[in-house]
Amino acid sequence: MSDQTLPNSYSGPRSSRLEDETRARRSNNTLDVRAVRSLGVNAVFPIALGGASWSFSDDHDVEERAIKTIHTAIASGVTLIDTARAYSRVAHPGHSEALIARALAHHPARDRILVATKGGHYRDGDQFPIDAKPDTIRRHCETSLELLGVDRIDLYQLHWPDPNLSMRKAIATFGELQSEGLIAAIGVCNVSIAQLEEARSVVPIVSVQNSFSPFRQDDRLMLDYCAERSIAYLSYSPLGGPETRHLAARFPGSAAVAASKGISLARLALAWLLRCSPVLIPISGAGRPETIYDSARAPDVALSEEEVAALDFDLPSRGPRTPGRSFSSRGDSIAVAREIGGKA
Ligand SMILES: NC(=O)c1ccc[n+]([C@@H]2O[C@H](COP(=O)([O-])OP(=O)(O)OC[C@H]3O[C@@H](n4cnc5c(N)ncnc54)[C@H](OP(=O)(O)O)[C@@H]3O)[C@@H](O)[C@H]2O)c1
C-alpha cells in the first residue's frame, strides 16, 4: 500500500468493483496508484505509451529511437501501447502500427502487451479525413490487423465521431467486428457523455480516450461517469502535448515540489493525474527511452500531505464541463494539429 494521500480534487468513483477497491484504500486515506488499472477484462500498468509522434517525421533516427522507446517502456512495466491508423507517414499509411509490430516481434514479453489502435480517421497526404462509414471502418480494421501482425486487435477505438454519421451507426460496425472475433474490445475517442451513451446503447465500451492534463481539465464529468461504470479513461496528451515545455512556468508550485523531491515535473504531473481518478490511464507521448523510463516511475511517486497541499496543478475554474465536447467543422485538421503539436 502506498503512503500517497488523495488530493482534494478526487471525487469518484461511486459504484462498481473499482469503487469497492478504491473505497478500501481510501479508508486509509490512500489510493494505491501503483496498482494496475482495469481496461475491460484486462489489468494494465497505470502508464501507457502512445505512438503518434513517431510517425509524423520522416527521420530514420526517429524510427530507431521509437523502437528503443517501446523496449524501454516494456522493461519499465508498461503493458499498453496506443496507436492509430492516422499515425502515418505520407509514404507509409499505418506507419506507427508497423513500427510497433516490428518492435514487438519476437519480444519475450509480447504476450503481456496490449496494443490499442483506432480507425475512422486516416492520413491522405497532408489531410486527415474523418470517415466512420461501415466499409471504411472494416477496411481500416483489416489493414490494422495486417500491419500489427495479429489475428485480433486488443482494443479497437473510434478515433473521432464522424460528423456525417450517427454514433449509433458508426459504432455498430465495431460491434460486428467484435462478433466476428477481429477485435477483442471497443473504445471511443474524443467523445461527449451523450456520444458515449449512444455508443454504449449499441455495444459494450471499455474505454474512452479524451484529453485530460494539468492544462486541460474540462472533462471531469466524463472522468466521474467512467469511474462510476468501470470504463477506463485513457488520457491523451497527459502532459499537454506541445504545451509540455510550459509546465514549469504554468505550475511553479508543483515545479518546486518536484525539485524538492528530485524528480521531474513531468513525472510528478503524471503522478498527480493518477490521483485524479482510479480509472485514468495517462498515455505518455514519449519519443525517447529516457522520457518513458522517467514517466513510468510516476506510479511510485510518494507524496506527503504537505507536498499534495503545495501542488498547484488543479485548475478548479476549468471543470466540470464535459458536455461541451463536440466535433467542430475544422475537427479533422484540429484533431491532427493536437496530435502533431499544433502544426496543422
Ligand atoms: N485520440 C486522440 O485524438 C489523440 C490525440 C492526441 C494524442 N493521442 C495519443 O496520446 C499520446 C500522447 O500524446 P502527446 O504526445 O500529445 O502527449 P504528451 O505525453 O502530453 O506530450 C508528449 C511530450 O511530452 C514529453 N515527455 C513525455 N514524458 C516526459 C518526461 N518524463 N519528461 C519530460 N518530457 C516528457 C515528450 O518528450 P520526448 O519526445 O522528448 O520524449 C513529448 O515532447 C499520443 O502518442 C497518442 O497515442 C490521441
Image (spheres, rainbow, N blue to C red):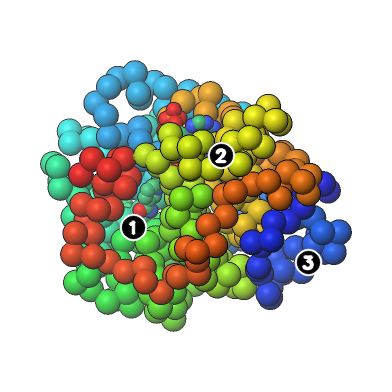
Q: Quadrant of residue 316?
A: bottom right
Which quadrant is home to the C terminus? top left
Q: Residue at x 51, y 50 (%)?
A: 214
Task: Please state the horizontal and vertical placement of residue 158, each as a whole percent of the image.
Answer: 35, 61
Mark 2 or mark 1, whichever is nearer to me = 2
Task: Please state the horizontal and vertical placement of residue 208, each as a whole percent of the image.
Answer: 47, 62
Q: Residue at x 28, y 53 (%)?
A: 335
Kind of element beneath mark 3: helix
Mark sitting on residue 23: 3
Kind of element beneath mark 1: loop
Kind of element beneath mark 2: helix
Q: Does the Cβ of the disc 3 residue fall within 8 Å of ligand 1?
A: no
Q: How many marks?
A: 3
Let me know if residue 152 appears in the view: no
Q: Which residue is mark 1?
A: 159
| Disc 2/disc 1 C-alpha distance (Å) | 34 Å
Contact check, label 3 and label 2, Cβ < 8 Å: no
Residue type marked 2: Pro
- Of mark 2 and mark 1, the one earlier in the sequence is 1
Q: Does the Cβ of the disc 1 residue fall within 8 Å of ligand 1?
A: yes
Task: Please state the horizontal and vertical placement of residue 322, each as a whole percent of the image.
Answer: 44, 70
Mark 1 or mark 3, whichever is nearer to me = 3
Residue type marked 3: Arg
Q: Does the Cβ of the disc 2 residue fall within 8 Å of ligand 1?
A: no
- Of mark 1 and mark 3, the one earlier in the sequence is 3
Q: Please state which of residues 153 and 315 is positioned toward the viewer in this rendering.
A: 315
Apparent side of residue 30 relative to residue 264 in the rendered image (left or right): right
- Of mark 3 and mark 2, the one earlier in the sequence is 3
Apparent side of residue 279 relative to residue 32 in the rendered image (left or right): left
Q: Which residue is mark 2?
A: 252
| Disc 3/disc 2 C-alpha distance (Å) | 32 Å
